[in-house]
Image: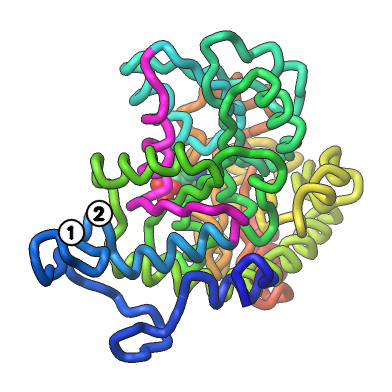
């Protein structure tokens, strides 16, 4: 069966992964080697040096490209290394239009790394399409979308933003980390490039840092393969193996995590101490219909804030959960709890945070795949401290 004809779960397990030709090993071996013997000068099996090619990495690149319905997959040592390669497609004088509710590390890279090399980023609220249109000018070369947004979990209309960018002949890239390819496939919605921090849902077990790019355009793919080799931010074979293993259960993990998240969001809505619950899967969420159209499920991230809006109150919840571990990151099998105002979004001025609803008491959950009754009980016993 060709990969294109496989459904998602079959692709997750089989795409790019064939029994190893030398031994028949069912699991892709970790090719822990830096170089490959050649029979004669220039006569080799397609592998010369391990920064350039590695069979474990090849298998993963093929697998991830299949999951995103793309032709080319290119892996990097982290999500931010993947992003850096995309930024290097631009030249001094080029501009980026990006969403404003963005992963902090992506914002930092655009502003504090690439701006020095003459690439200017503009940050706009992309839930408002008029603002996207207005922000594009003759120097704009890239539109950078991240949806669901972090930590407010707003949904950006990928197809609509890509249509606007295309009309201006501007390249689009979607950071699909929060949704994972199981929930959302941006290339199908018109995006040119998809990128992932595989550290999150793709790896799924909080045991590896890794990044990936998937796309259909061969000329851009060749530039990115060139950058992967020329800059050298490549993942090690063991890391590729871990992501490859994680991906085999992506659909099961994300399915269960989304189910748990929905139940937790509903529990939070009914809690007297909770003020706002941000979860696109709630029927009265302004992005419910769009999320339903664009995503397979509503995701496993839930944010909420408290009626008594202070750091101290939030801290009582954050310090007292036992199963929800207080930690940065997301997308692992275990549930995590975080405080954007002091953790991931601490570098954003308070007034700016408040404008988008990121209050002092806002708490972000990355819901894992434990028994949801235990997770709710854990939150319940933490709320008692309020
Ligand atoms: C974590 C994350 C990144 C960065 O990925 P790393 O693997 O940590 O370098 C980029 N985008 C989003 C949305 C993320 O959550």
Q: Which residue is mark 2?
A: 52
Residue 375 visible in rendering = no
Question: Which residue of the protein is positioned furthest toward the left in this rendering?
Answer: 41
For the residues labelled 2 and 1, say whether their Cβ atoms are less than 8 Å apart. Answer: yes
Q: Is residue 241 left or right of residue 190?
A: left
Q: Split into 4 quadrants, where in the image is the N terminus? A: bottom right
Would you call the spot at circle 2 few (<14 residues within 10 Å), some (14-19), or many (20 or more)? some
Q: Position of residue 261 (x, y in %)?
A: 72, 61
**Residue 13 occupies quadrant:** bottom right
Part of the protein shown in magenta: 67-92
Image location (x, y in percent) of residue 230: 24, 41
Which element type, helix, strand or loop, lies under badge 2? loop
User: Where does label 1 land, which residue?
Assistant: 49
Residue 376 image position (x, y, % from top left): 72, 68
Residue drawn at (47%, 30%), measured in percent from left and top?
107
Q: In the figure, 308 relative to 269: above or below?
A: above
Crowd class of label 1 (few under 14; some 14 to 19; many from 20; radius 10 Å): few
Q: Is residue 76 magenta?
A: yes
Q: Where, by quadrant of the figure, is residue 382 drawn?
A: bottom right
């Amino acid at each position: 069966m060709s990969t294109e004809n496989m459904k998602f779960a079959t692709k997750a397990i089989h795409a790019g992964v064939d029994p190893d030709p030398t031994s028949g090993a069912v699991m892709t071996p970790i090719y822990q080697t830096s170089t490959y013997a050649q029979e004669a000068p220039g006569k080799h099996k397609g592998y010369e040096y391990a920064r350039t090619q590695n069979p474990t990495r090849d298998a993963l690149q093929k697998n991830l490209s299949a999951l995103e319905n793309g032709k080319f997959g290119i892996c990097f040592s982290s999500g931010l290394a993947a992003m850096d390669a995309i930024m290097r497609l631009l030249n001094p004088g080029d501009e980026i239009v990006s969403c404003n509710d963005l992963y902090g590390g992506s914002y930092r890279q655009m502003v504090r790394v690439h701006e020095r090399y003459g690439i200017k980023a503009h940050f706009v609220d992309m839930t408002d399409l008029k603002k996207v249109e207005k922000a594009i000018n003759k120097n704009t070369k890239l539109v950078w979308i991240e949806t669901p947004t972090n930590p407010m979990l707003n949904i950006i209309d990928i197809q609509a933003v890509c249509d606007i960018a295309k009309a201006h002949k501007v390249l689009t890239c979607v950071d699909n980390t929060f949704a994972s390819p199981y929930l959302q496939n941006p290339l199908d919605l018109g995006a040119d490039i998809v990128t992932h921090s595989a550290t999150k849902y793709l790896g799924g077990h909080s045991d590896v840092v890794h990044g990936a790019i998937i796309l259909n355009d061969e000329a851009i793919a060749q530039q990115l393969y060139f950058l992967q080799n020329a800059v050298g931010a490549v993942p090690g074979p063991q890391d590729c193996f871990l992501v490859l293993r994680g991906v085999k259960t992506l659909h099961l993990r994300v399915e269960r995590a989304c189910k748990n998240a929905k139940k937790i969001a509903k529990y939070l809505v009914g809690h007297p101490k909770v003020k706002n619950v941000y979860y696109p899967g709630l029927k009265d969420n302004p992005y419910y219909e769009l999320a339903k159209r664009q995503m397979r499920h509503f995701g496993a991230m839930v944010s909420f804030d408290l009626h008594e809006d202070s750091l101290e109150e939030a801290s009582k919840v954050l310090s007292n959960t036992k199963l929800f571990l207080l930690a940065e990151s997301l997308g692992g099998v275990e549930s995590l709890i975080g405080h954007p105002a002091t953790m991931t979004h601490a570098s954003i001025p308070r007034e700016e945070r408040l404008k988008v609803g990121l209050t002092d008491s806002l708490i972000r959950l990355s819901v894992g795949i434990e028994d949801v009754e235990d997770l709710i009980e854990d939150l319940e016993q933490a709320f008692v401290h309020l």
